[in-house]
Amino acid sequence: MIRTRFAPSPTGYLHIGGARTALFSWAYARRHGGKFILRIEDTDLERSTAQSTQAILDGMAWLGLDYDEGPFYQMHRLARYHELAEQLLRTGNAYHCYASKEELDVMREQQRAAGLKPRYDGRWRDSKKTPPSGVKPVVRIKNPSDGHVVFEDLVKGRIVVSNNELDDLVLLRADGVPTYNFGVVIDDLDMNISHIIRGDDHVNNTPRQINILKALGGALPQYAHVPMILGSDGERLSKRHGAVSVMQYLEDGYLPEALLNYLARLGWSHGDEEIFSSEQMIEWFDLASINCAPAKFNPEKLSWLNQQYLKTADNTRLAELVTPFLETDGCNTATGPDLLNVVGLLKERVNTLAELADAAVYFFRPLEPSNELKVLYFSSEVRPAMVDLMGQLTSAEWDRQIIHDSIKAAATKHGLKMPKVAMPLRVMVTGEAQTPSIDAVLELLGKEETLKRMNNRLTDFPD
């Protein structure tokens, strides 16, 4: 059975790169009827936090990346790592190293001075020296000194690394906590992971992990190293490019299905398909279609894609999602027009839920027009037409077409073009210069509120 995993370290939020790795692993397992496992690699005791763990769990839940097993925590499995470290010691595939940090620092400085690549020199590998008293040793793998590690990467193709390029890395630290390369191997072995899909920053770890697995007599999984995500300028992705917490996209008003769709297209494609559901991705996903070149993160493309999802989203769902944004902006959605109708009117004009909320504010509380808008649109020439329009609207049936005809009639009566009346009316009622068609806005806003706002603003017009 196909078994994949996502194994983040809880040293920060779930970021874009991690979310894409999780998505690819999840989609591959779902595509093949396999299992997707979540594992929290929390052995970095100084940097791992409960808040980061929760942020990862929240991000996975929001994106809908459900896992079949887990979350498993490495710090709950220390006994197992110690057991297999002892096994490697017994079989001669590992050894205790008593070198101090100071000794190793001197060793590396000497190597650098000699123009050599800094690496552990194996001083305790076959040492017969008496261990120094009171020193807790680390456990190191006895890496093969000749031959090559060869594996077929499902994205990058065949990779060959000479064993003499690899040193005897630490498996267990002196405090008994496993290093990343040891913990991850034991977990993948015990959890029967068949396919390891991860970022290509781990390519250099893979030969080391393969040698540990071989020393344990374990079956090798298949590896797929996904190229990194770059900023639109080709530089390493950072916060200025949008490499923020996945949950920040929730706060900024993106839909999870839009973000998933966008992440899927970062380095993977199915023909020319741009917009597709998670179900379609599962049906199409394969590792062979992952591009070997780094992907570029484009915030504008993400915004465009989110807009496409907003346009077709259910209004009831959007109303629920936009309500917290409106409440933060001081709006009580219970006192204005039906929010479902407001959403239906505005959703095709915005890119995010935050923009949708901003565009909807004037339906729930009056906005003060800027002085610039007042100067531009509130003139003595228009004032008589506006007074006349108020009289017409007071007795009019409240219907969009009738509102439209009333605006047109007021403009015609006073020798003005339609926009000469419609624009000042828009600013009077909404405080904005850009809205949907003003007759549609007024119909939703209601007669009483419309006339109240017009009357309050009429004093801003010069006589």
Image (cartoon, rainbow, N blue to C red):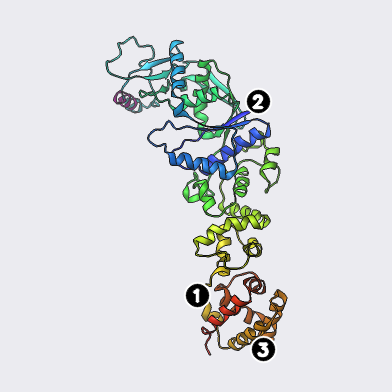
* Among numbered discs 3 and 1, the one appearing first in the sequence: 1
**Residue 122, picture quadrant:** top left
Category of crowding for the residue at label 2, using alpha-carbon neighbours closer than 10 angstroms: few (below 14), some (14–19), many (at least 20): few
Q: Is residue 104 magenta?
A: yes
Q: Nearer the viewer, residue 420 or 32?
A: 32
Q: Is residue 137 above or below residue 13?
A: above
> Which element is circle 2 on?
loop
Judged by depth in the image, the label closer to the viewer, 2 or 1, is 2
Q: Residue at x 67, y 71 (%)?
A: 440
| Residue type beneath disc 2 | Met
Q: Quadrant of the N terminus?
A: top right
**Residue 388, picture quadrant:** bottom right
* Among numbered discs 2 and 1, the one appearing first in the sequence: 2
Residue sitting farthest toward the left: 133
Q: Main secondary structure of the magenta part?
A: helix
Q: Residue at x 67, y 41 (%)?
A: 281
Which residue has dot 1 on it? 370
Residue 411: image x %, image y %? 67, 85
How far apart marks 3 and 1 lie (CA) works out to 27 Å
How far apart marks 2 and 3 lie (CA) works out to 78 Å
Which residue has dot 3 on it? 415
